[in-house]
Amino acid sequence: MRFSGKRAIVTGGASGIGRAAALRFAEEGAEVIVGDIDEAEGGALAETSNGRITFRRTDVTQADQIEALVTAADQAGGLDIMFNNAGAGGAREPIDQISPEDWDRTQALLLRSVALGIRYAAPLMAKRGGGAIVNTSSVSALGSGYAPTAYSTAKAGVLHLTRIAAADLAQHKIRVNAVVPGFIATNIFTATLGLQGAARDQANQAIAGMAAHAQPIQRTGRSEDIAAAVAFLASDDASFITGTHILVDGGLTIGTRQSWDPSQPSMFAALDQFAA
């Protein structure tokens, strides 16, 4: 019960990583406010939580709605944990084809929303003598080939914002960290494509199958894997950690496939024949 007596906000908490994190916080004693645009799933989550989770419809591209979400926590008694997680795949076009409007929309959803979540949460936490903020980034922040350009750029911005905000807020005893997921079995990219029903399920299965073979830990990443890291960063167990991130990617970014897959030819193996 690491979060007994604490209150947490989770944006994008109606499904995927956010839902897993909201449940984890609630299971460990926190009161949780979930903000999301999915009223059906958000409401259902709250109804089955025995009063530990409440839902508030929140579009994180709208500053006033983020502020209202944080104000709801203040009115309920205060805010101790802010998990800025809401997001979607965003615009998929490469940099030489994307429209200015699609670029701005993606940045507003994935980066501006995090900045404003920090902006509105920090004063409340400062009043309570401190708090913990966790932001969701992505392996796409670390290199190309993992996600579309606009998404990857926004997630890289989240990592840098995390570091800078940690410096800004240290004086208020507010820690700011990020979690960096790899390929996780959620609906984030199928939702962006507008896939529903059987088509969505088939696409998710295909993505999961490819992901399980793209990394040293050969299973699909789960939302609960990320929620565990988020809970750690938000807890007093991480009281000496700020301005950094935890990579939860099954080893995806550990190195080239040749470094961990013995079935793949490597430069050193090729050279060994000459040494022999």
Image: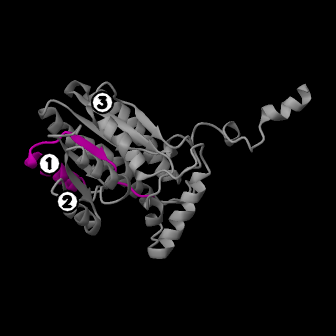
Does residue 254 appear in this view?
Answer: yes
Location of residue 22 with respect to 216 vertically, above or below: below
| Label 3 – label 1 distance at C-alpha | 23 Å
Residue found at x 23% / y 41% = 81
Give whichever of discs 2 and 3 has the lower sequence position. 2
Q: Of the residues shown, which amino acid type is indicated by label 2?
A: Arg
Residue found at x 63% / y 37% = 255
Q: Residue 133 versus residue 208: which sits nearer the camera? A: 208
Mark in the foreground, 2 or 3: 3
What's the magenta region?
Answer: 63-90
Tag shown at residue 21: none
Mark 1 lies on residue: 73
Tag shown at residue 237: 3
Does residue 90 appear in this view?
Answer: no
Tag shown at residue 56: 2
Location of residue 146 with respect to 177 vertically, above or below: below
Magenta segment: does it hold 266?
no
**Residue 56 vs residue 163: left or right?**
left
**Residue 200 vs residue 48: left or right?**
right
